[in-house]
């Protein structure tokens, strides 16, 4: 653990950063960074809803009936559109390298209406508008 309270850890077979706060400030461990790339299910409008709710939702993958939140491990690349986030819930074990997944129901993953839901702290959003201008927001580090 360094002076900033960060340490490297191995989560689901790849390096992730875990950020911990000291015990005086309501102890919490955050796993990440993780990111989701722009897609038909990860739009700028979706990112705005995620920022408001501090949640990311996921439906079952194709050929599955298990709701799950899926993303990639690591920071959002400088030339990519999407969101970057941390979460207090550890991702599932045994996922392909570079990916992360949360299935539930289990502690930290609730399932409602065929959606898995996890609490997140979004640290960056980046999307292009219709004119090709980049809209990037680095979000404050508010508590979950």
Image (cartoon, rainbow, N blue to C red):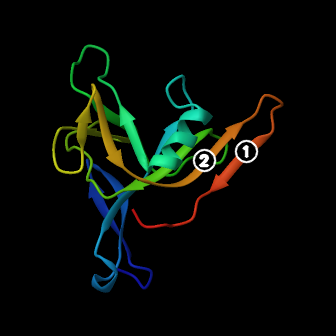
Q: Dot 1 lies on which element?
A: strand
Outermost residue on the left side: it is: 106
Q: Is residue 6 above or below residue 48?
A: below
Q: Nearer the viewer, residue 73 or 45?
A: 45
Q: Residues within 10 Å of mark 1 (few under 14, many from 20)?
A: few
Tag 2, which secondary structure? strand
Query: Could you give the CA–CA distance between mark 2 and mark 1, rounded to whole angstroms?
Result: 8 Å
At 54% from the left and 44% from the top, the residue drawn is 83
Are discs 2 and 1 less than 8 Å apart at CB? yes
Give me the residue at 57% from left, 32% from top.
Answer: 38
Report the front residue among 65 and 55: 55
Foreground of the two, 91 or 9: 91
Q: Residues within 10 Å of mark 2 (few under 14, many from 20)?
A: many
Q: Is residue 116 above or below residue 85?
A: above
Q: Residue at x 19, y 38 (%)?
A: 104
Question: Who is closer to the viewer here, 65 or 114?
Answer: 114
Mark 2 and mark 1 lie on one chain; the one further toward the N terminus is 2
Q: Position of residue 72 (x, y in %)?
A: 42, 41
Q: Could you tell whether 39 is left or right of 93 in the image?
A: right
Residue 91: x and y in percent read 27, 47
Instruction: Residue 50 in the image: state x and y as whole percent.
Output: 49, 43
Q: Name the residue located 30 percent from the left edge and 63 percent from the top edge.
A: 9
Q: Quadrant of the C terminus?
A: bottom left
Q: Which residue is mark 2?
A: 125
Indicate left or right for 103 with 73 as reference: left
Relative horizontal placement of residue 126, taking residue 87 as reference (left or right):
right
**Which picture quadrant has residue 8?**
bottom left
Which image quadrant: the N terminus? bottom left
> Which label sits on residue 87?
none
Task: Judge whether 44 appears above or below 118 on screen.
Answer: above
Question: Which residue is the extreme one toward the top?
Answer: 63
Q: Which mark is residue 135?
A: 1
């Amino acid at each position: 653990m360094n002076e900033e309270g960060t340490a490297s850890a191995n989560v689901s077979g790849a390096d992730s950063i875990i950020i911990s706060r000291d015990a005086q400030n309501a102890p919490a461990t955050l796993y990440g960074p993780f990111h989701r790339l722009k897609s038909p299910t990860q739009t700028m409008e979706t990112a705005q809803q995620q920022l408001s709710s501090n949640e990311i939702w996921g439906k079952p993958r194709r050929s599955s009936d298990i709701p799950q939140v899926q993303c990639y491990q690591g920071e959002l690349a400088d030339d990519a559109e999407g969101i970057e986030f941390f979460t207090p819930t550890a991702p599932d074990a045994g996922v392909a390298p570079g990916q992360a997944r949360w299935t539930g129901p289990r502690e930290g993953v609730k399932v409602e209406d065929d959606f898995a839901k996890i609490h997140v702290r979004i640290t960056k959003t980046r999307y292009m508008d219709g004119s090709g201008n980049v809209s990037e927001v680095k979000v404050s580090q508010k508590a979950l």
